[in-house]
């Protein structure tokens, strides 16, 4: 395993429209440069506390722009997009469910992540509450009884907090955010560039 | 003149590193889709007052990221880049000088804009003060005596304020920012997409 065979770290928040768009293609992009993607949800809310930044939709002008750009970007990719009525959404339960599953099977965690994103941004469902996360998980055939217990488990809470802290320590502050061989790339519109970095070793 | 023959509006702030990068290639990009670029400096400071946003370099994490991303983006384009010691810079004098020149000759205004950007981000000079703007203008052979008078002229002050207000009314909030046939594109990393819009008529 050489230096360039590492996984591409894919950081995202479950309430992030651009994270949703990135999630539609990160696996394919990573595969195109012979890599696997490591999905790592985090909490933008924790970042905003640290940076004083605000969700796009709270910022005048940026809000109006993103209302144009988000659906336009989705049309370009040919993926469904609706802006959730309740926004931004709390994403702690979604994160915990993800990391609980991931401990056993990263593939299953990724399946849940895709389903949650689809529920939020293709179907417009509010995935804030633990009940909503369990509902989506149930539709995917996951063991929702075990998941419900896990969502209240201190160990899973700690694991999730740790994962979010690790992301912030690595400098992650937006969604999506990629790290390729230690090099950070912020934004859905930089994903191709990140792949070029993976392929070429940088410039 | 059809709907798609209009100029590509290129908004930028003279203190914006990504605006500098955009300025290195907007003319070539516009020409590649058969268009001309309309250079329109504005004042990010006026936008920040309205939106409550802050310069990149005041935001933790984003600051560290941009210190990596700015020179990396410049390397990719093969253009020189130094981060000015004094940052952010005041850009009111630069804006006024630009719009004074533009009234007579847009080509000359563009030449001054390029020289100011080069002074700031290739040579690391502080272009905040009227004296610095005049110095750069003098190096380009402009009539600095007439320019100095113009910088204090109420008519030029009003014209500049008006231009900045018009930009904000159009939704411009970042630098660079392109408007193509009424469609807004924010960011140096969206310039190719904006050209695709110009070429295809959108999606």
Image: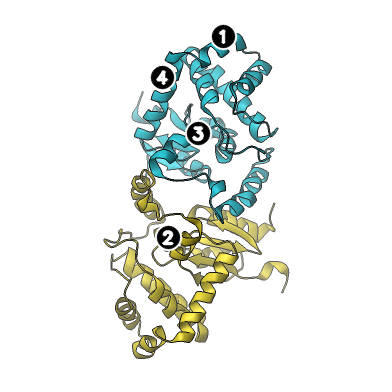
Chain colours: A yellow, B cyan
Residue where numbered disc 3 is placed: B12
- Point out the tag, 1 or 4, that comes first from the N-terminus: 1
| Label 3: element kind | strand
Residue where numbered disc 4 is placed: B158
Q: CA distance from mark 1 to mark 4?
A: 18 Å
Of residues B21 and B65, which is closer to you in this image? B65
Is mark 3 in CB contact (under 8 Å) with mark 2?
no
| Label 2: element kind | helix
Q: CA distance from mark 2 to mark 1?
A: 52 Å
Q: In the visual, does A193 lie left or right of A24?
A: right
Residue sitting at x 50%, y 55%: A187
Chain containing mark 3: B
Residue where numbered disc 2 is placed: A21
Residue A88's tag is: none
Assess disc 4: are there few (<14), some (14-19) or many (≥20) residues with their C-alpha within 10 Å of its C-alpha: few
| Label 4: element kind | helix
């Amino acid at each position: 395993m050489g230096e360039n065979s590492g996984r591409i770290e894919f950081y995202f928040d479950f309430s992030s429209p651009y994270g949703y768009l990135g999630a539609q293609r990160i696996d394919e992009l990573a595969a195109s440069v012979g890599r696997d993607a490591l999905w790592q949800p985090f909490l933008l809310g924790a970042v905003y506390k640290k940076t004083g930044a605000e969700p796009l939709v709270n910022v005048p002008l940026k809000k109006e722009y993103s209302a144009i750009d988000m659906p336009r970007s989705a049309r370009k990719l040919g993926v469904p997009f609706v802006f959730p009525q309740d926004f931004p959404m709390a994403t702690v339960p979604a994160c915990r469910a993800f990391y609980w599953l991931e401990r056993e099977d990263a593939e299953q965690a990724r399946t849940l992540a895709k389903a949650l994103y689809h529920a939020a941004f293709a179907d417009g469902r509010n995935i804030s509450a633990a009940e909503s996360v369990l509902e989506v998980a149930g539709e995917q055939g996951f063991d929702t009884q075990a998941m419900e217990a896990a969502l209240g488990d201190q160990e899973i809470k700690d694991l999730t907090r740790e994962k979010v802290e690790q992301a912030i320590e690595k400098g992650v502050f937006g969604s999506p955010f990629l790290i390729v061989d230690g090099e950070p790339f912020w934004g859905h519109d930089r994903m191709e560039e990140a792949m070029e970095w993976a392929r070429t070793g940088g410039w």
